[in-house]
Amino acid sequence: MSDDSQGGSAARPLKVDGVDVDLGGVRILRGVTFDVRPGEVFGIVGPNGAGKTTILNVIDGVVRPSAGTVRYGDVDLSRVRPHRMRDHGIGRSLQSTHYFRDLTALQLVALGELPNSVAGALRFRGHRKRREAEKAARHTAMDVLEQFGLTQYANRPLSELSSAVQKLVDIARAVVSGGELLLLDEPTSGVSGHERGAIGEALRRLRTLGRTIVLIDHDPGFVTGNCDRLMAMNFGEVLDVGLPDEVMNSDAVKRSYLGEAADIDVEVEKSS
Ligand SMILES: Nc1ncnc2c1ncn2[C@@H]1O[C@H](COP(=O)(O)OP(=O)(O)OP(=O)(O)O)[C@@H](O)[C@H]1O
Ligand SMILES: [Mg+2]
């Protein structure tokens, strides 16, 4: 059986168990173990270089672990190639949309729908089939932009849009590209305080639609207000997993992540 033929039903748990990652002779992740429950917003926090993005890279197959397993329901993700993750309901947002700044919002979201990415679309030999695929992609992309309240930005290049709108457009692309389990890398980076509410609102809407979200963010208020559970990590290891308040106030997190003298006062960001 090929790696791409593994199926699976909706609402599956993600189980990361004992994952080590070695890159360039350096151990980046060490024994990382956590579960994400179906339908929850699971936050990952930690200082720069803690290994947060590497975890998303392991989940979506960009980086292969040197030990441990990643399972999504009954699918062993280590056997799935990155460009086939969409077939298993896994979509990912980008830490930065900088390289796509000349694309319009519609074009970026449509990229998520093109079969097996742009490379896959280019495999179509006949022009007619390609045009049909592109038309279907644009149609789906418009639908999702509408669901996100972003229709007015459809034909504007990303470079003209605010950071918050760019992030929302990229989350829309992740929804289109996979949809069921969303891996979001710093959706509020570069987004001003008052615009973060719109991102939190989109996350909560996706959650009510039954999506499962794994979210990396540096903002304690944002993660505490928008995540069901949190995992804190440092130096490639898990420090703590639990309810956001408990994790952010745990001694291990204060000591290792926020510094010995940290006295954090988390102001919860949650729009009504
Ligand atoms: N391809 C690679 N080769 C070697 N080292 C790498 C590679 N990718 C990441 N690293 C290193 O792995 C560590 C973890 O990186 P990662 O990007 O996962 O951190 P992060 O927690 O996402 O940080 P940030 O908050 O800055 O985004 C860092 O020390 C980084 O320099
Ligand atoms: Mg990162």
Image (cartoon, grey):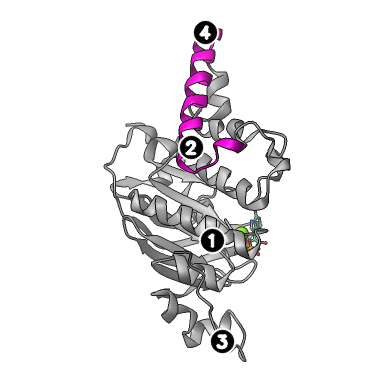
**Foreground label between 4 and 3:** 4
Query: Is residue 272 at all visible to an observer of this figure?
Result: yes
Q: Circles 2 and 3: CB distance less than 8 Å? A: no
What residue is at 57 percent from the left and 27 percent from the top?
118
**Foreground label between 1 and 4:** 1
Mark 4 / mark 3, whichever is N-terminal: 4
Ligand 1 within 8 Å, label 3 CB: no
Residue pointed to by mark 3: 255
Give SS at disc 2: helix
Give SS at disc 4: helix
Residue pointed to by mark 4: 128
Give how far apart the Cα atoms at labels 2 and 4 are: 27 Å
Which amino acid lies under the numbered mark 2 shown in the image of this protein?
Glu
Q: Is residue 143 above or below residue 89?
A: above
Q: Quadrant of the C terminus?
A: bottom left
Which amino acid lies under the numbered mark 4 shown in the image of this protein?
Arg
Residue pointed to by mark 2: 146
What residue is at 34 percent from the left and 48 percent from the top?
209
Mark 3 / mark 1, whichever is N-terminal: 1
Which amino acid lies under the numbered mark 3 shown in the image of this protein?
Arg
Q: Circles 2 and 4: CB distance less than 8 Å? A: no
**What secondary structure is the stretch in magenta mostly built from?**
helix
Q: For mark 1, does the 10 Å Cα neighbourhood hold few (<14), some (14 to 19), or many (20 or more) residues?
A: many
**Foreground label between 2 and 3:** 2
Mark 2 / mark 1, whichever is N-terminal: 2
